[in-house]
Amino acid sequence: MTDKLLDLSGLTKAYPGVVANDDVSLRIAPGEVHALLGENGAGKSTLVKMIYGLVKPDAGQMQMRGENFAPTDPHAARQAGVGMVFQHFSLFDALSVAENIALGMENPPRMRELSQQIRDVSDTYGLPLAPDRIVGDLSAGERQRVEIIRCLLQDPKLLIMDEPTSVLTPQEVEILFKTLRKLSAEGTAILYISHKLEEIRSLCDSATILRLGKVVGHCTPRETSARDMAEMMVGSALKTPTRDSKEPGEVTLTLNKLSARSAHAFGMPLREISVEVRRGEVLGIGGVAGNGQDELLNALSGETLVGAGMITFDGRDIGLLGPTARRALGVLTAPEERLGHAAVPDMSLTENAMLTGAAREGLERGGMLDWGKARSFAEKIIKTFDVRTPGPGNAARSLSGGNLQKFVIGREVLQRPELLVVNQPTWGVDASAAAAIRQALLDLASGGTAVIVISQDLDELMEISDNFAALNEGRLSSTRPAQGLTVEEIGLMMGGAHGMEVAHV
């Protein structure tokens, strides 16, 4: 019995203008939980895509259980015992759990037999899931269980997890970790990618750190502080976000019994949300994914129009104004879905800068677009927010998720908003970049901007919020001062526990 399950030696992969992986080597033993750490653009995604057969390496070799391993596609990787749970779920909302799982299997059994297999795996690994439930009705944590069970039914020897806790409550994280520890005890190796370093310290046996495509170090997470790991990733000291102590100003945004239908069949309608936000205030809004976060941002951005008197900005009713008119007033937003909503995948960064910055940055005049100014604006975003890309002419889809997130947030911050609403501002972003984004939001607030941060990252909300509220089933709780709230209290509020009161300001 070899002590190596997967052995990577000298893997190299280059794309035009960038070497994504440069002579990368690592080993994973059966039952080992191995963390893969690095900044956005460090090469993590490219490496796991080579293991999963989505990308072919230019040089180097892989071995699985002592034999050459060179999967030409994900099917070949799965046949060799590799399963992968992606950061973005690949599920059909209108189908049941069992139907979704069947679609991801090579040779699915009959539906009755498959349903029983799903129940058995659910019970064995502590992943409660009914096979006949419609996926569109599931929470984010339950959707992740669908993806995991689909992998487990194929008996993987290596399970790759990419940012698995980014949309989970603390309670759901505990369920996931119990499952992963049980798999590890049974001999399944886990390659775990996450920017949540305290989770890495709790779960992982070992870690490999990538920087600019190269392996720059290894560590034992339990014996290494989160700060030390972050500084190994970036190669420099990590800055902690700070903020000037300042009293908030006048009320700038008032929501008065805001109600709105969801644009999606499986979305969550907003139900009588009332709250006030002041200039210079950071309002943090937590909630389990799917409880109205997207719908709230769309109502504030103008993508969803609402009734008279529901949204007032600086004393003006803006409920019937569209996104362009609201942007002209200084109401800017950054949605959670960065590729497809916040940015057009096949458009260049210059074109994506133009999409939301035309009015406030003076990128058009008399109906004519000023592409020189647009390019300069894109270059400013790239430089200020350290976006790793060859240049502003590159398509949005060519960026790693974290680098595109930095571009999207930077694009809005640099337009000097009066009110900025962001959903998941640091989702999938490394520790250094997350600190920079949070600092930029705090700097806006210090300058008098009202900031609403919608996030499932409780540490983030605790760090930057003045006041906190939780979304549950489309309702918003009463706001509470963030200082003094515990993570456990917030997690329970997010889950709708303790008879969460609806705010009527």
Image (spheres, grey):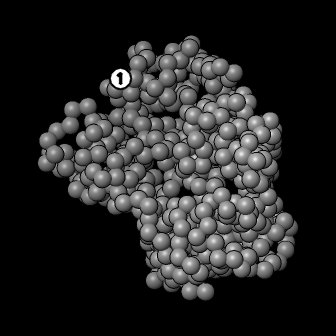
Percent position of residue 317, x then y: 64, 76
Residue at position x 84%, y 65% in the image: 447
- Is 30 above or below relative to 485? above
Other-residue count near label 1 (Cα within 10 Å), few / some / many at <14 / 14–19 / ≥20: some
Question: At 39% across and 31% down in the image, what residue appears?
Answer: 82
Residue placed most toward the observer, 198 or 245: 245
Q: Amino acid at mark 1?
A: Ala
Q: Is residue 224 visible?
A: no
Q: Residue 445 is drawn in which quadrant?
A: bottom right
Name which residue lies at 76% across and 36% down. Answer: 371
Say above or below: 11 vs 477. Answer: above
Q: Position of residue 195 (x, y in %)?
A: 61, 46
Residue matched to label 1: 76
Tell me the element at label 1: helix
Location of residue 444 in the rendering, given as x and y in whole percent from the top left corner:
79, 62
**Whether residue 302 can be seen here:** yes
Question: Can you say whether 291 is above or below 56 in the image?
Answer: below
In the current view of this chain or complex, which residue is farthest to the front?
Answer: 366
Q: Residue at x 26, y 31 (%)?
A: 106
Which of the two residues, 71 or 441, is positioned nearer the viewer here?
Answer: 441
Pinpoint residue 224: horizontal percent, then vertical percent: 67, 45
From the viewer's side, name the closer residue of 355 and 55: 355
Q: Is residue 5 left or right of residue 44?
A: left
Quadrant into which the C terminus falls: bottom right
Please tell me which residue lies in front, 341 or 123.
Answer: 341
Number of labels in the image equals: 1
Quarter of the image with the N terminus in it: top left
Seen in the image, is 268 located left or right of residue 387?
left
Q: Is residue 125 left or right of residue 359?
A: left
